[in-house]
Image (tube, helix red, strand yellow):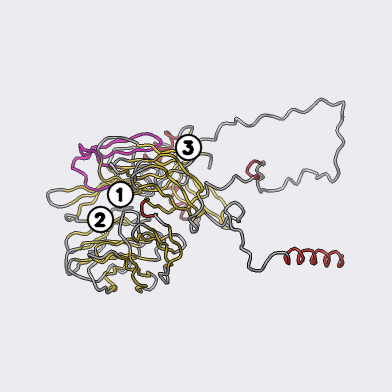
Amino acid sequence: MRSTLMLALAFVLACKGDRPADAPTRTALSVQTPRGPDNLVLRIAQKGGTARVYAYPRLDTIVWSAPSAPAPARILGFDDEAGEIAYVDGRGLPARLDFRQGGATTLTKAKLTSLVSNDGSAIYAIAADGAVQRFAESGTWKWKPPLTPRALFPQPDGSLLVLAERKEGSVVWRLRPPSTDVVDSAVLPRVDRALRTQVGDRLYLGAEKELTGLRTRTMERTQSIRMDEPIELLAATPSGDRVFVVIKGDSAIHVVDRYQEKETGAIELRRHVGELRMDPLGRYLLARPEGVDSAIVIALATNHIVGAVATGWRADLPFVAPDGGIAVAQGPDVYVVDGESLRPRTRVRGGAADFWYPFRWTGFRPRAAALDQPVEFAGVPDTAGVAADTAVRPDRAAPPVVARDTTHRAAPGWTVSFAALLVADRARELASQIHVGDQTARVITASRDGSTIYRVVLGPYATREEAERVGRESRNSYWVYEGGP
């Protein structure tokens, strides 16, 4: 046995010795072990045309392309389940780029404003007549509010917040499309600007010199914070724990703590800031000094100013990539600089002629062979059965056994889920409070990463429409998924 191991080791060393020490290591996407979603960048010519997706950070490998796409103006969101990017084209119309179908489509030619999306799936907009519209795979939806809407804020739970103006101030309504019933509202002072946190649980509102928050679940206002001058810019970390405020005539960025509900510090700059851009992962804040084509990079862990880098400011650039690199536009080229040192990593010649959008997805990976194999589920072993340790010779005289066709089994329906909790008592308490008709929600258990999850559900139901109806009638936050509990 020992001689066999020594022989194998000698063979490995001999093979390794044939490779030069400075030989490059192959890092192609197809041979790397996947560690989470792939980092990708979409590039579309600013005048419209071919759309290409590049592997990031090398940016020299095209993994997908489509021959024609409308000229982009800004991105609304990426639906990773459908493999679609929703965006606004150069004419102000909503469009979708479908990676699975390999093309782009414009959803409507009607004049719309305030186009927004929470996740790239459902797109909301305000029509010319003041109606609020939704464009989704399940169909369109429309609601005409009693007052002219000013801004829309779709929420992760499927609800929609609508900001409108009144004579005495502003009002925020909450709806749950496709229902057109207002389920809650909040009356506010006249709002000049509004910002929704990435997780959707807070809406920050600037009214002259006052900053106030709105808890979107309960529609309750937080304590107001008064600034010295009128508020001009707002930005928040993805979790919403800090809000960064720029006020008129001040070169500092003021930091407001969500939990203390007060200003806790300021980041002093040399110039007044004309624009703020938040890193989607909350590591950096980019600030554009007024009248200067550059970006001041602020590390949010310490509120430390890393430095400044030259860049033009557009809807797509600069941006912070998932690996911490910062893409900037310098003349006709695009550079990716290191977020910590601001030293250039990559240069893309002529890249500034394209519209850029970074995203993460696994959909371009080759299909694993294991996906075509039967799925085996871990469960309680059958103690009544006897395991065979030798093969059984078939009886040739016996009739052939025909396998039952199970490829067309009906789906078990649609389930309404209200919460997934780690504490059983809280789950049972919540379930006892949810009633729809003669039905009461129940608690089921599941296991995830070694922990027991207590899910509060109703269903399953035969159709998605029925499940959606039950979710709306419950008057609770919910989501619908296909399959049994």
Please state which of the two labelled residues, at mark 3 or mark 1, is closer to the viewer.
3
Label count reads 3
Label 3 belongs to which residue?
Answer: 101
At 57% across and 53% down in the image, what residue appears? 29
At 52% across and 49% down in the image, what residue appears? 362
Disc on the earlier residue, 3 or 1: 3
Q: Position of residue 378 (x, y in %)?
A: 66, 49
Left or right placement of residue 435 versus residue 397 in this view: left
Q: Position of residue 102 (x, y in %)?
A: 47, 39
* Amino acid under disc 2: Ala
Disc on the earlier residue, 2 or 1: 1
> As rendered, which of 49 and 221 lies closer to the eye?
49
Left or right placement of residue 307 versus residue 211 in this view: right
Label 2 belongs to which residue?
Answer: 194
Based on the picture, tell me whether residue 127 belongs to the magenta stretch.
Answer: yes
Task: Specify the quadrant of the image occupied by residue 16.
Answer: bottom right
Query: Compared with residue 150, is residue 25 higher up or lower down, i.e. above or below?
Result: below
Label 1 belongs to which residue?
Answer: 153
Please state the extent of the stretch shown in magenta in the rendering: 125-153
- Residue, far left: 167
Task: Specify the quadrant of the image occupied by residue 252.
Answer: bottom left
Based on the picture, tell me whether residue 185 belongs to the magenta stretch.
Answer: no
Q: Position of residue 287 (x, y in %)?
A: 30, 65
Circle 1 — which element? strand
* Amino acid under disc 3: Gln
Q: Tell me the crowding category of disc 2: few under 14, some 14 to 19, or many 20 or more residues within 10 angstroms, Cα based.
A: many
At 73% across and 45% down in the image, what residue appears? 382
Circles 2, 1 touching at the beta carbon (< 8 Å)? yes
